[in-house]
Amino acid sequence: MLLTLIITLVIALVVIAVIVNAIQQHKERLATLKRAEFSKLRTMLEDTEELIVNSANVPLSAAISQMLLKRIAFTLRAMVELEPGAKDIKQRLQETEKRLTETPATESTLSESISLPDNDQQLIGMIKGIKKLRTVLRAEHVRGNVDTQVVIQEDKRLEVLQLRINVESQIKRGNQTRNNNMLGSSRQYYEKALTALSATPHQDEYVVTRKSEVMQALEDIATQLKEGNVRDREKKEEKENKDLDELFAPKRKW
């Protein structure tokens, strides 16, 4: 009888230990998933805030600004659900919701002029920012946070902006190398600009004007290179004739 009781207690203890261990593992697994989800949300928050900060280089429309603020608010709410005691996150959520009510919903005219940075890394950052913004725009559309018409309009605007940055950058480099008489490099930059202008489906006034200017620049460079080749050939022939004259000239007797 006593042996049976002991065996029963041992089995019960083993079962309890197994259950406790399973519960502990489950809690640890939930904690790991919670940390991973929180880290994912934090990354999403930082990326979205970076897009807003980048508005100094890439102008944002009212629709895009509203979309980004809503995305931030959504992310902060999810983070509060995971960490209800995080007062700093709650504070940021309140501030974001306040900004949402203060941000104008009406569109304002965006400047079409582009100020390109001299630093290549900053220029690459601008292009990456636009690409990321277009990706976020599509993602928010899938989640139902942006109207289809807004997505079409804004994606087209961002695509045109990306084209302009690319074209203006190539033309700027083409002008610089041309001024330094590096005609071969200059021609390559202009050709890249022409390729981008010809490939875009948005053949507006800007594209037509820039394409005409680039083609004229390429024609001028071709003329300069042709004239340079003629001068080089003339100099070469002149040198060859001079060498022949010296070769067949009467030798002086000393």
Image (cartoon, grey):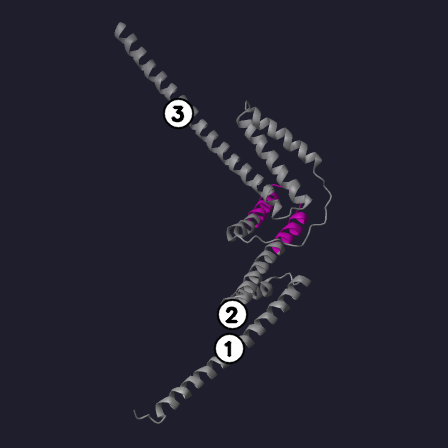
Q: Secondary structure at mark 3?
A: helix
- Of all residues, the one furthest to the front in this rendering is 254
The amino acid beneath tag 1 is: Gly
Q: CA distance from mark 3 to mark 1?
A: 79 Å
Using the image as rendered, state which of residue 93 and residue 234 is in the foreground. 234
Disc with the residue nearer the chain's start (2 vs 3): 3
Q: Quadrant of residue 166?
A: bottom right
Asked if marks 3 and 1 touch (Cβ < 8 Å), the reply is no
Residue 169: give its label.
none
Where residue 195 sits in the image (x, y, percent)?
A: 56, 65
- Can residue 146 be seen at all in this image of the molecule? no
Asked if marks 2 and 1 touch (Cβ < 8 Å), the reply is yes
Q: What stretch of residues is rendered in magenta?
A: 130-159
155 with respect to 105 (left or right): left
Q: Secondary structure at mark 1?
A: helix
In reply to whether residue 147 is colored magenta, the answer given is: yes
Residue 228: give its label.
1
Using the image as rendered, state which of residue 123 and residue 198 is in the foreground. 123
Image quadrant for the N terminus? Answer: top left
The amino acid beneath tag 3 is: Gln
Disc 2 versus disc 3: nearer the observer: 2
Q: Which residue is mark 2?
A: 183
Residue 25: give its label.
3
